Image (cartoon, rainbow, N blue to C red):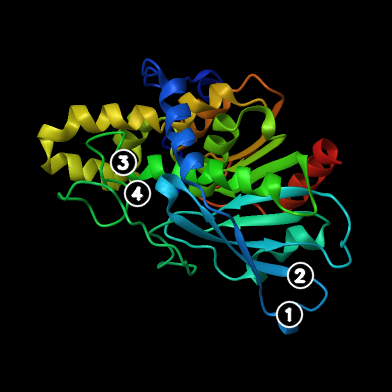
Amino acid sequence: MPLFDLSEPELAEHRVTATEPDGLDAWWAARIAAARELAEPVTLTRHEELAYGPMPVWDVEFSGDGGDRIRGWYLRPAGSDGQRLPVVVRYIGYGGGRGLPLDHTLWAAAGFAVLVMDTRGQGARWSIGATGDPGRTPAGPEFPGVMTRGIASPETYYYTRLFVDAVRAVDVASELDGVDPTRIAVAGGSQGGGLAIAAAALSGDRVRVCHADIPFLCDFQRAVRIAPKTPYSEISDFLAQHVELVPAALDTLRYVDCALLARRITAASLFSVGLMDMVCPPSTVYAAYNEITAPKEIAVSPFGVHDVPRGHIERQLRHLREHLG
């Protein structure tokens, strides 16, 4: 896999390509407030007690964007009854869903409560999902996948809904029994990393830690021009045919560009990047990382592609303990 992006010195200086829309904070605040107004009570149903034994697991359902019901998992460490624990809200990579609780037991085994958010309209490629996307988008052409769903307007764009879901997951995590609402982390890889950035940015100082591995959804204006692989190429392939939508689509993407939103992060952040990553080009990752003014670290894999070295997980666990206790 060749090096195809900026050099390391250039990456350290690279900034997001797009300009921020006027009134972006107010736009997001109104969208999130509307979702909170429509929210109905969270439901938790104990899941497979025989299978998980002393590690309690619940099937969760909560209200996301537009009041749509979003599924998830809530896991706690064995023997943690009566304790108020730090919680890690985890988001899933592109095409995947919440999977099974066994996919997320590491964090509970390490002593953290875990809330896993399912991803609306996904969960059919590499892990199973359980949440649809009712979608309030006008009918029209779209590329297979979700990257172009409703892309003509930020109000109808798929990722607008998904970002609100991610913020609502933080709301829900803070209210769960046995959780310390002052010790919340958000985490994920690829799309999940982008969602973690968005949730940390749009939830203010409620989030103490942000872990974004090889994050997607950053510096869209550059990504859709240089990324040779999906998912970014879903957008470039679509716009190659629908030339009339190029201005509107590029404007929409400014509202969900995690590199622009990252300026708002107050959480202690740990990113990772692979310098040979052709899915999420390293310059797009650095575009988000370089906008953060809060305490931050980045783990650089010089020969890394779209993956994270296994040893990085231990660094994440140490980082969580350092900042959440």
In the picture shown, does residue 313 fall above or below 122? above
Looking at the picture, how far across and down is residue 253, in whole percent?
A: 33, 32
Q: Earlier in the sequence, mark 3 or mark 2?
A: 2
Q: Earlier in the sequence, mark 1 or mark 3?
A: 1
In-front residue for pair 178/4: 178
- Indicate the amino acid at tag 2: Pro
- Indicate the amino acid at tag 3: Tyr
Residue tagged by mark 2?
Answer: 56
Residue tagged by mark 1?
Answer: 49
Looking at the picture, how far across and down is residue 125, in whole percent?
A: 41, 67
> Can residue 305 be seen here?
no
Between the residue at mark 4 and the residue at mark 3, the CA separation in whole angstroms equals 21 Å
Residue tagged by mark 3?
Answer: 157
The residue located at (74%, 84%) in the rendering is: 50
For the residues labelled 4 and 3, say whether their Cβ atoms are less than 8 Å apart: no
**Quadrant occupied by the C terminus:** top right
